[in-house]
Image (cartoon, grey):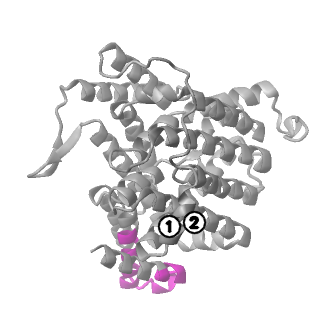
Amino acid sequence: MKKYFEFDKLGTSYRQETVAGITTFLAMAYILFVNPSMLAAEGTGMDAGAVFVATALAAAVGTLIMGLIAKYPIALAPGMGLNAFFAFTVVLGYGIPWETALAGVLVSGLIFIVLTFTGLREKVINAIPAQLKMAVGAGIGLFIAFIGFQNADIIVADPSTLVKLGDLTSGPTLLAILGIVVTVVLIGLGVKGGVFYGMVITAIVGMLFNLVPIPERIIGEVPSLAPTFGAAFTHLDQVFTLQMLVVILTFLFVDFFDTAGTLVAVASKAGLMKDNKLPRAGKALFADSAATVVGATLGTSTTTSYVESTAGVAAGGRTGFTSVVTAGLFLLAIFFSPLLGVVTSHVTAPALIIVGIMMASSLKDIEWDKFEVAVPAFLTIIVMPLGYSIATGIAVGFVFYPIMMAAKGRIKEINPIMWFLFIVFILYLGFLH
């Protein structure tokens, strides 16, 4: 094992890798409870217990593939942002059955695998301007945070102004506010797994004040996967529509850059980059795309690499053994399903808001002083939360980018792939109307 993972070459040990694996798990364990609360939100029709198990198993399988094949200390799980897009845009917004949405995730994963092996993936990534990539990340951050504020009842509906500040004196809302304060303080102090610990503290306080139900037990039987397992395959014939094409493109697009950015960030922090290139990049991308296919089969939205893996790297993780440890902990997590009832929307809301803050950091990398860049970037970012749709935000931004570049006399800089997407998204927006 030590020889396979090159412990001596990378200057690590079983103890160091194990501590790193545990650290990574704690940093991203919040997804076990946040993902079911998102995908099984009222109106979607999905089973929370099944989604919980699918989340844990998809994370375990994807992380294990990453550890054993790519040999990177990178963990995977259903991605934040993509789960919001799945639940609130595709299922609740478009009225698409969750089974069909899962079929879309499955197809996007299969396409990802093909693009990875053919080398087309790099061409697609390079065709899309870095500024738009940054805008998409920031927009998703604002969208997730908006959902968090809604779940906390900090922002509520209003017939006159659409939205307004909620009743900040109500018990559940105060609990969510406490959760935000506790979580930002923990992260500010550099506590590894601050988001997870923030949820734990919030839940405990909620139980003390009768705002959160007290679980009868902590460990219980593993919920059945039957409600979601294989549902994607039964609805594959329903993905051949323009609307589902855009949905699949969005799944694919966001996963593309989420994965690429995370792989580079974690590998750089671990000192694993060579000549500014990522060794075994193809294997790492395969792990990510295979995990998406597995997750869709089990019953969850797109599974992707987590930037929280940097927490494990900071704790000393350098090899795939770190991921093997993290995968084992995700497997153990399936026995803790009784805790799902404790993690209410007011308990998970702070996690959504904090993740949104982190994702919004990409705003600093956008060239706001260039109007041809600022227009599509701003529209991408603002339309996502206001239009309550990640796909619509991407569509508007990708339509305005060629227009602004052409207006500025920079038409030769537009990649043909961007013109193709320009046409697709114009049709999509017209279809939505």
**With respect to residue 358, does 186 lie above or below?**
above
Q: Is residue 414 magenta?
A: yes
The amino acid type, in three-letter code, at marker 1 is: Ile
Q: Report the front residue among 399 and 326.
A: 326
For residue 180, side relative to residue 290 (left or right): left
- What x and y, as percent, mark residue 352? 40, 40
The amino acid type, in three-letter code, at marker 2 is: Val
Is residue 138 in view from this perspective? no
Magenta-highlighted residues: 395-420
Q: How far is mark 2 from mark 1, CA to CA?
A: 7 Å
Q: Is residue 100 magenta?
A: no
Residue 248: which disc?
A: 1
Q: Residue furthest left?
A: 160
SS at circle 1: helix
- What x and y, as percent, mark residue 9? 87, 39
**With respect to residue 343, does 280 lie above or below?**
below
Could you tell me what secondary structure mostly forms the magenta stretch?
Answer: helix
- Give the quadrant of the C terminus: bottom left
For residue 161, side relative to residue 179 (left or right): left
Residue 107: which disc?
A: 2
Q: Residue at x 68, y 58 (%)?
A: 285
Q: Residue at x 77, y 55 (%)?
A: 279
Mark 2 neighbour density, 10 Å: few (under 14) some (14–19) many (20 or more) = many
